[in-house]
Amino acid sequence: MSQEIPDNVEKPKPLCEACAGIQRNWRRAKGHAELHQGLNRKEPRRHGQVTITEYQCDRCGTNWDYENDKNNLNVGWSVVPR
């Protein structure tokens, strides 16, 4: 049984082909040429602070965070709901 998203809730937009090809949760994975870099922020982790950079795709509008934590290879790209 599938559940429909109510009309008052913003439905997620589909990822463009380039965004769909980004490997998530891997620190050394590449983005793509149409990602526009935004702000950087620092966030605390057990071992210290890490840098997270915000990106937005010029083609499909998807918002991404890229976490650069040299102590954790299983971070990297993640889609950000906004």
Image: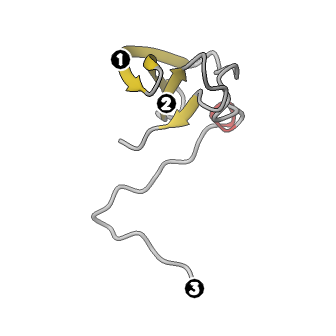
Q: Where is 48 relative to 74, above or below?
A: above
Relative horizontal placement of residue 73, taking residue 40 as reference (left or right): right
Of the two numbered discs 3 and 1 in the rendering, the one whose residue sits closer to the viewer:
1
For the N terminus, the quadrant is: bottom right
**Residue depicted at x 70% and y 23%:** 29
- Indicate the position of residue 8 as horizontal and vertical percent values: 27, 64
Q: In this view of the protein, which residue sits in the foreground, 33 or 71?
A: 71
Of labels 2 and 3, earlier in sequence is 3
**Residue depicted at x 45% and y 74%:** 4
Q: In this view of the protein, which residue sits in the foreground, 18 or 26?
A: 26
Report if the CB atoms under discs 2 and 3 are less than 8 Å apart.
no
Q: Quadrant of residue 69?
A: top right
Q: In this view of the protein, which residue sits in the foreground, 38 or 11?
A: 38
Residue lying at the far left of the rendered structure: 8
Q: How is the image coloured?
A: secondary structure
For the C terminus, the quadrant is: top left
Mark-to-mark CA distance, 1 and 2: 13 Å
Of labels 1 and 2, earlier in sequence is 1
Of labels 3 and 1, earlier in sequence is 3
Q: Quadrant of residue 43?
A: top left
Q: Secondary structure at mark 2?
A: strand
Q: Residues within 10 Å of mark 2 (few under 14, many from 20)?
A: many
> In the rendered image, which residue does mark 1 sit on?
41
Q: Amino acid at mark 2?
A: Trp
> In the rendered image, which residue does mark 2 sit on?
64
Q: Where is 72 relative to 16, above or below?
A: above
Q: Secondary structure at mark 1?
A: strand
- Indicate the position of residue 49 as horizontal and vertical percent values: 41, 17
Q: Residues within 10 Å of mark 3 (few under 14, many from 20)?
A: few
> In the rendered image, which residue does mark 3 sit on?
1
